[in-house]
Structure formats: C-alpha cells, structure tokens
C-alpha cells in the first residue's frame, strides 16, 4: 500500500469523522480510523478500524501514515503525539473551534475551561509539530450541525418537538453562521494535502449569516411546526435556566449561552475559501440532519 494513500483519523466515530472518512474513501485513500468506541468487527477493504486506548496512544508500533486528521477534541491530541511521531507523519490537521474566540470573555467556569483546553491543544500542536518538522493545520469551525448528531441544533430541535415553543432572550438578534458537518469534513480533507495550507489556522463559517431568532424559526419549519419563539425578559430567563438545568438533558444550559443570543458571532472564512476551496452551503436543515 502506498504510504501517501494512507490517512490516520482520530475521533473516527464522531459525525464529522464519519463524513471525512467517506470523502477519504472516495479519494482512494486507505483510512486508519481510531476511536475510543469499540468497532463492530465489520471488515472493510479500505478502512482499518482501531480502538484507542492508553496502550495504543503511547505505542510506537504503528504503520507508516503520512497524513493525520484529528476530529477528536483538540485538547486530547497531545496524548497521541508519540504514536503520530512514530508513524512518520508529514502533516497533522486538527479541528478546534471559533469558541476559542467567541467565549474567551465568558463568565461561565465551564466555558472558561473549554477555552483553556482549545488554546492549550492548539499551542501544543504547533510546538510539537515545529519541533518534529511536521506541517500543521488548525481549523476552527463555527456552530456545526448535521446528521442529527451535533450538540447545538439538535437540542433546539428536541426542545421544539417536545414543548412546541422556544425561549429567546430579548430579540435574539445576534448573528450566526451554522456550518454543515459535511462542509467541515471537506475542508479537513482539502487541508491534508494542499500546500498553501501548511502551518496556518483557518476559520470555517457557514455559507449564510442569519440571526439566532431566524435560525430557531427555521428549525420549527423543518420539523413541521408553526414558528413559536417566545421572547423572555432577562430576569425570567435566569429563573428558567435554573429550573431546566434540573433535567439532565439541559444541565449544560447557562445564562451565558442565553446572553450570546444577542451577540454577533461572525467569522470570515475567506482564507479557507482561497487556500482550501472551502465553499459552505446555506443554512438548510434536511430530514437527515434531524435527531431520531
């Protein structure tokens, strides 16, 4: 097998990972798909599935793999450097997030920890790669959706289906750029080989900019309901968040998240369009993008 046709994917069972593997297979690459989840034992001629464990992460007995894609959380990437180094890596592409910028001033401790993890992961990749003579590419997508497996829009969909309305803080006029998982995966695959991408960081935003309120209204339309956003004053929203956090599904909801409904989270992806051929779709939810 040609070494240049091999690609290692960390976080292969994630929804972005699955999209990326499909693209890599179409390109004629053999994929070494690493995931913490056990695989079903199905034999595939162009995919070798391996379960990640501490032993595997620290192993130096790995096949030659020139190109690596990390769609697992970038904060965990450093623990796999020994394995990647032993494979003779040429380039590592890692998925980070624009949350590094959007949430840097958050007052929520959980979000502060997220930002620290993103920053540490990015910096660790740059430092390690430069010390090893390995090219790196960092991709920062905005709000990812698709395949009914994201942690953003699927929560809105489930809330709308169950309750028939959705609470919004004030006018919820903050701008958003949702980006589909398949478009993120396309950028990941492009970043593996295109020479101009080496040692650069790119924002990956969606092909359409719309308000948070409009985004929620489109969710209603997709699930076949008349849009029923409910404008809630700040004091009542704080009380509501405290209440819904009693339910496990909404435990991660915070007042800080609500406050951002009225802040613009807009990022330019012109560099990615130029260097990676990134051309994201407009925000359209298909039935395949909804959770079961």
Image (cartoon, rainbow, N blue to C red):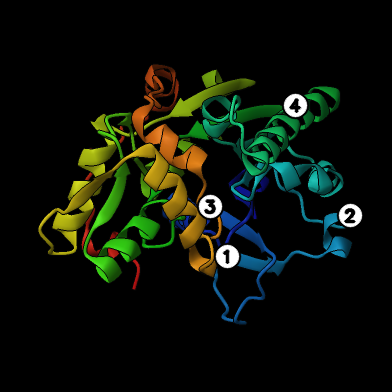
- Are discs 2 and 3 less than 8 Å apart at CB? no
* Image point (89%, 54%), residue name: 58
Q: Secondary structure at mark 1?
A: strand
Up-down relation of residue 228 to residue 214 (above or below): below
Of 118 and 45, nearer the camera is 118
Of 150 and 226, nearer the camera is 226
- Residue 60, given in percent of the width and then of the height, sits at 89, 53
Q: Secondary structure at mark 4?
A: helix
The numbered mark, 4 or 2, whose residue comes first in the sequence reads 2
Residue where numbered disc 1 is placed: 47
The Cα–Cα distance between marks 4 and 3, rounded to whole angstroms, is 29 Å
Residue where numbered disc 3 is placed: 29
- Residue 166, given in percent of the width and then of the height, sits at 27, 54
Q: Give the quadrant of the N terminus.
A: bottom right
The numbered mark, 3 or 1, whose residue comes first in the sequence reads 3
* Image point (74%, 25%), residue name: 126
- Counting other residues with Cα less than 10 Å from the Cα at mark 4, is it few (<14), some (14-19), or many (20 or more)? some
* Image point (41%, 41%), residue name: 235
| Front position among marks 2 and 3 | 2
The numbered mark, 2 or 3, whose residue comes first in the sequence reads 3
| Front position among marks 2 and 1 | 2
Residue 23 visible in this rendered orientation of the protein: no
| Front position among marks 4 and 1 | 4
- Are discs 2 and 1 less than 8 Å apart at CB? no
Q: Secondary structure at mark 3?
A: loop
- Residue 108, given in percent of the width and then of the height, sits at 62, 38
The numbered mark, 2 or 1, whose residue comes first in the sequence reads 1
Looking at the image, residue 134 sits to the left or right of residue 177; the answer is right
The Cα–Cα distance between marks 2 and 3, rounded to whole angstroms, is 25 Å
Up-down relation of residue 121 to residue 12 (above or below): above
Residue where numbered disc 4 is placed: 123
Residue where numbered disc 2 is placed: 58
């Amino acid at each position: 097998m040609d070494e240049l046709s091999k690609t290692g994917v960390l976080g292969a069972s994630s929804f972005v990972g699955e999209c990326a593997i499909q693209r890599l297979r179409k390109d004629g690459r053999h994929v070494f798909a690493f995931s913490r989840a056990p695989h079903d034992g199905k034999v595939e001629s162009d995919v070798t599935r391996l379960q990640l464990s501490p032993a595997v992460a620290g192993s130096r007995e790995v096949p030659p793999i020139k190109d690596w894609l990390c769609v697992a959380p970038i904060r965990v990437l450093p623990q796999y450097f020994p394995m990647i180094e032993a494979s003779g890596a040429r380039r590592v592409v890692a998925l980070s997030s624009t949350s590094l910028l959007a949430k840097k001033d958050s007052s929520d401790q959980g979000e502060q920890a997220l930002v620290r993890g993103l920053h540490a992961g990015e910096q660790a990749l740059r430092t390690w790669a430069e010390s090893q003579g390995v090219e790196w590419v960092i991709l920062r997508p905005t709000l990812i959706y698709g395949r009914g497996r994201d942690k953003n829009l699927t929560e809105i969909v489930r809330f709308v289906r169950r309750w028939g309305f959705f609470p919004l803080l004030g006018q919820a006029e903050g701008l958003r750029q949702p980006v589909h998982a398949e478009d993120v995966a396309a950028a990941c695959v492009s970043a593996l080989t295109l020479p101009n991408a080496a040692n650069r960081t790119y924002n990956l935003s969606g092909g359409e900019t719309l308000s948070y309120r409009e985004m929620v209204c489109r969710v209603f339309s997709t699930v076949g309901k008349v849009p029923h956003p409910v404008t809630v004053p700040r004091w009542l929203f704080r009380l509501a968040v405290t209440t819904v956090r009693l339910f496990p599904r909404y435990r991660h909801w915070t007042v800080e998240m609500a406050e951002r409904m009225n802040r613009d989270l807009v990022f330019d992806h012109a560099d990615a369009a130029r260097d990676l051929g990134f051309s994201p779709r407009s925000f359209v939810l298909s039935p395949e993008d909804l959770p079961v």
